[in-house]
């Protein structure tokens, strides 16, 4: 997605050897007009796929996922990282290990929001090691629903996430694919859409 790549080049900052900071338009402050274009681009690609739900994980996946859901005219569900007291029945959970933070956390979705009839599109802001997406897939499969694809806003292709998901038989569709960082600059490889 050209518009997204241009925005990353303009406003993204490379931190250290493997982190891309995009807090001015995606992970903290959010540019709704870019999110709308992201929603349009994914929905154009998946419009014939029979998607019934969009699933993401809090926090930064929510903004792009909601715009995708709006365009596909289906509900968006975000997995929660902390259990809250109103989630008291039929909770589906998965353990997610973060290589970045070196902690394992439990993520959950109320089972009543997913059923075996559902065809789910997972949307997330970043794909790094793929652990968040793997956890979401486990939860969706516990509900008996099927995962149609994993849609990613920014894939860091030098990390293992895509390989992990594709080896598990999943389809990954990324709007921007970062091949490497060179002298603080982002070098892309060809995106999926
Ligand atoms: P994984 O899900 O692909 O395995 O990723 P990993 O454990 O490595 O990353 C943990 C968190 O860090 C995730 O967000 C992920 O989106 C984010 N992250 C990974 N690489 C980058 C990067 O280069 N830039 C930025 N900005 N974020 C990155 P999270 O902890 O779930 O945070 P949030 O969504 O609540 O903000």
Image (cartoon, rainbow, N blue to C red):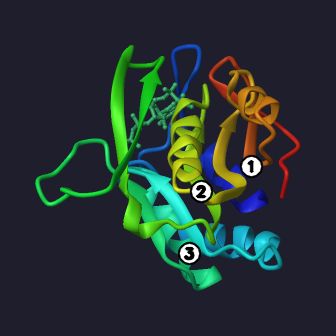
Q: Residue at x 21, y 45 (%)?
A: 83
Q: Name the secondary structure under disc 1.
A: strand
Q: Please say whether residue 31 is visible from this viewpoint.
A: no
Answer with the quarter of the image where residue 29 lies.
Answer: bottom left
Q: Residue at x 24, y 58 (%)?
A: 89
Mark 2 highlights which residue? 144
Q: Name the secondary structure under disc 3.
A: helix
Left or right: 46 as drawn, with respect to 184: right
Task: Look at discs 1 and 3 and give the one toward the viewer.
Answer: 3
Mark 3 highlights which residue? 69
Mark 2 or 1, nearer chain start: 2
Q: Name the secondary structure under disc 2.
A: loop
Tell me the tag on residue 174: 1
Mark 2 or 3, nearer chain start: 3
Viewer-proximal residue, 67 or 37? 67
Left or right: 79 as drawn, with respect to 176: left
Task: Look at discs 2 and 3 and give the one toward the viewer.
Answer: 2
Classify 10 Å Cα crowding around label 3: few (below 14), some (14-19), many (20 and above): many
Which x, y percent locates residue 64?
53, 63
Which x, y percent locates residue 172?
77, 46
Q: CA distance from mark 2 to mark 1?
A: 25 Å
């Amino acid at each position: 997605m050209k518009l997204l790549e241009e925005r990353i080049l303009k406003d993204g900052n490379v931190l250290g050897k493997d982190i891309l900071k995009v807090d001015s338009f995606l992970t903290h402050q959010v540019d709704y007009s870019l999110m709308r274009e992201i929603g349009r681009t994914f929905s154009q690609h998946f419009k014939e796929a029979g998607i019934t739900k969009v699933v993401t994980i809090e926090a930064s996946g929510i903004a792009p996922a909601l715009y995708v859901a709006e365009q596909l005219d289906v509900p968006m569900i975000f997995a929660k990282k902390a259990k809250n007291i109103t989630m008291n029945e039929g909770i589906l959970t998965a353990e997610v290990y973060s290589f970045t933070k070196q902690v394992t956390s439990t993520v959950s979705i109320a089972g009543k929001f997913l059923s075996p009839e559902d065809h789910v599109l997972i949307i997330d802001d970043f794909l790094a090691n793929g652990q968040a997406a793997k956890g979401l897939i486990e939860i969706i499969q516990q509900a008996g629903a099927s995962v149609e694809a994993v849609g990613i806003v920014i894939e860091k292709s030098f990390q293992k996430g895509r390989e992990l998901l594709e080896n598990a038989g999943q389809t990954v569709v990324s709007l921007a694919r970062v091949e490497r960082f060179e002298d603080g600059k982002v070098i892309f490889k060809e995106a999926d859409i």
